[in-house]
Image: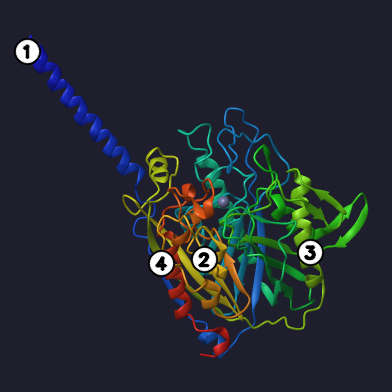
Amino acid sequence: MKKLLFRIVRWGAVLLVMVVIGLVARGVYAFRDRTPGYALDLKIEAAKSRAAPKPLRVGFARIKINPNLSDPKRPVWVAGFSHHRAATAIHDDIWAIACVVDDGYTRFGVVALDAIGFFHDDAVAVRRGCAPEWKLDYTTVCSTHNHSTPDLMGLWGADVLHTGVDPRYRQQVIAAATQALGEAVAALQPARVAFHEIATPTDGLVADTRKPIVFDPDIRVLHFTSVTNGATLGSIVGWANHPETPWSKNTEITADFCGFLRDALEHGVTHEGRVLAAGVGGIHLYVNGAVGGLMTTHPSVTVRDPYLQQEFKEPSHEKSRAVGHQLAARILPLLAATNAAATDIAPIGIRARTLQIPIDNKLFLAAAYLGLIDRGHVHWKKMRTEVALVTLGEASIACVPGEIYPEIINGGIERAPGGDFDIEPVEVPALRELMPGRPKFVFGLANDELGYIIPKSEWDEKPPYLYGSKGVYGEVNSCGPDTARLLHTALAELCRETKSPGSGK
Ligand SMILES: [Zn+2]
């Protein structure tokens, strides 16, 4: 009897050790670094280009990234709202759209993906896929944060235990982004650039679903035209809103308002055979800005289509179109006009840096452990990400690796009553105060998607909740309370190091 008991205990111990080894091995694998040793500390000064300017060149290209919906055995899981949302159709095409700018010294590439988010090592994979002869000094891969596209982050699969990412689709997107950059390089041609800042009231367009109510409301545009004939080559449009207009029940792949906007800029707006607005041609990118906190065309928002003179409240593709048309109606007149301020001299300066962000979010850790979030981790509870500040002529662009709250960009962070820390605002001064030049673009979800970037003094997981509310949404999709401070510090440093385009230094 004693012998049997001894045997049971011995085998039990062996089994326990094996289970522990298995669990540890799983952890080591899950938290492996997918881009070991990757560290960027890029400093490209615009000074040389300013001292002896050469004419600007630009190239645009786009590659479709529609998923394959023809195999019933491989459902395509739509990202952004809930599990088990299988795509049923392609309503309109989704794209990887690239713009490459060259000032004769430095070459900068931007890719905008119709995607929920793209992790840092996937952005690195795009870079590594670029041929050396393309001579790209720096590329930034941005996601529009579209909630009607295939899961690329792993959180929206068949159920909570399974990733929604199809690795083949991820490879398809990496390849498309790379190819788009290559084709944009091949398309480089002499160009002028004009900058536009368009004040845009948020009423009937965007809601902020979390206090304090702060928006990043304005539209900013980089408009590139041909030196030879003045024709539009393309543009980069920056605004801040969640592309989730068709909402949670939609199962059709769509580029949302971003796609309708791009189409309207290129082709104009035609309805029932009548031309309501003329397009300007070219290829247009939509890049999202400070969408945290949370900027959304919520189902409670009624949007008026300025061309069709119709109002849309219920989530639908027509409502997405109305949002796209709202933006197009503001942008098109500026693109169609001859812009005397357009210039073919736009020196490029780039500062880009990798940094490590702690993961305090237990759900993110569990998701990584289970293989749902399959991204590079520098080690346990740390992930690598990247910030950048690019100057192009008078304009500057802050590349932010996630969904930053607008108050960190524009000011207005509060010592929020009910917040977990009860401290004065940490992420100050506002980044737009520190950024050089004008206009000051924010490219959100750039080279990564870390989730929400929440001011520490507004961080709230424990009751009492902010401003007497019953609870807040945001923290569940954030790495932790120090993410904002670390990113703000890093971006502020890049701003201080970058000499103002106007200063002549
Ligand atoms: Zn979001």
The answer to which of marks 2 and 3 sits earlier in the sequence is: 3
Badge 1 marks a residue whose secondary structure is helix
**3 or 70, which lies in front?**
3
Badge 2 marks a residue whose secondary structure is loop
Which numbered mark, 1 or 3, is in the foreground of this view? 1
Question: Would you call the spot at circle 4 few (<14 residues within 10 Å), some (14-19), or many (20 or more)?
Answer: some
The answer to which of marks 1 and 3 sits earlier in the sequence is: 1
x, y percent for residue 188: 65, 70
| Residue 194 seen in the current view | yes
Which numbered mark, 2 or 1, is in the foreground of this view? 2
What's the amino acid at mark 3? Gly
Give the residue at mark 3.
281
| Residue 188 seen in the current view | no
Q: Is residue 56 above or below residue 320?
A: below
Give the residue at mark 4.
40
The answer to which of marks 4 and 2 sits earlier in the sequence is: 4
